[in-house]
């Protein structure tokens, strides 16, 4: 038995493609406009101040984040639990490695 509400005939693939392409173009245009507004809102003097501070400070290498021995993903900041938040690896299953020595 047929349902009381009839299915609407599907659109032609070309019409669907054209409609989706128009929506994508509109979204890309909105993103471009928002990025432009964001660049205008950013204070130019604060950017100049930040670059001056970076030039004054000596560059230091970023400290490597601890990684899970099971999945080798970086562990999130904060207190480390008993198992990996990503894969569930139990850290007590392996001994803790010493940090690598600096090479001379």
Image: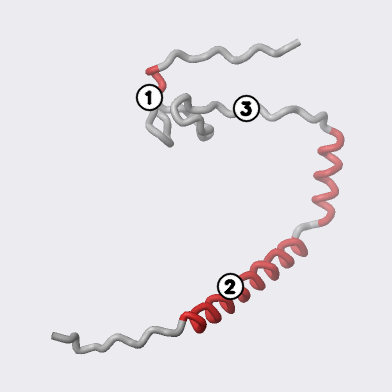
Q: Nearer the viewer, mark 2 or mark 1?
A: 2
Q: Is residue 24 above or below residue 80?
A: below
Q: Residue furthest front?
A: 13
Q: Which residue is mark 1?
A: 90
Towards the viewer: 87 or 63: 87
Callout 1 environment at 10 Å: few (<14), some (14 to 19), or many (20+)? Answer: some
Who's the residue at 37% across and 24% down the image? 90
Residue 64: mark: 3
Q: Which residue is mark 2?
A: 24
Tell me the distance, in whole angstroms, between the alpha carbons under discs 3 and 2.
39 Å
Callout 3 environment at 10 Å: few (<14), some (14 to 19), or many (20+)? Answer: few
Q: Is residue 69 above or below residue 45?
A: above
Residue 4 spot, x, y in % from top left = 19, 89
In the rendered structure, the answer to whether residue 13 lies left or right of residue 41 reads: left
Q: N-terminal of the two: label 3 or label 1?
A: 3
Q: At numbered mark 3, what does the secondary structure look like: helix, strand or loop?
A: loop
In the rendered structure, the answer to whether residue 34 lies left or right of residue 55 reads: left
């Amino acid at each position: 038995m047929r349902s009381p509400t009839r299915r609407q005939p599907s659109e032609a693939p070309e019409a669907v493609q054209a409609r989706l392409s128009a929506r994508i173009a509109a979204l890309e245009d909105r993103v471009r406009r928002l990025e432009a507004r964001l660049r205008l809102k950013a204070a130019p003097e604060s950017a100049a101040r930040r670059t001056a501070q970076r030039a004054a400070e000596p560059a230091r290498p970023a400290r490597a984040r601890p990684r899970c021995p099971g999945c080798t993903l970086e562990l999130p900041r904060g207190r480390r639990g008993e198992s990996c938040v990503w894969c569930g690896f139990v850290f007590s299953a392996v001994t803790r490695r010493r940090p690598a020595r600096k090479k001379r």
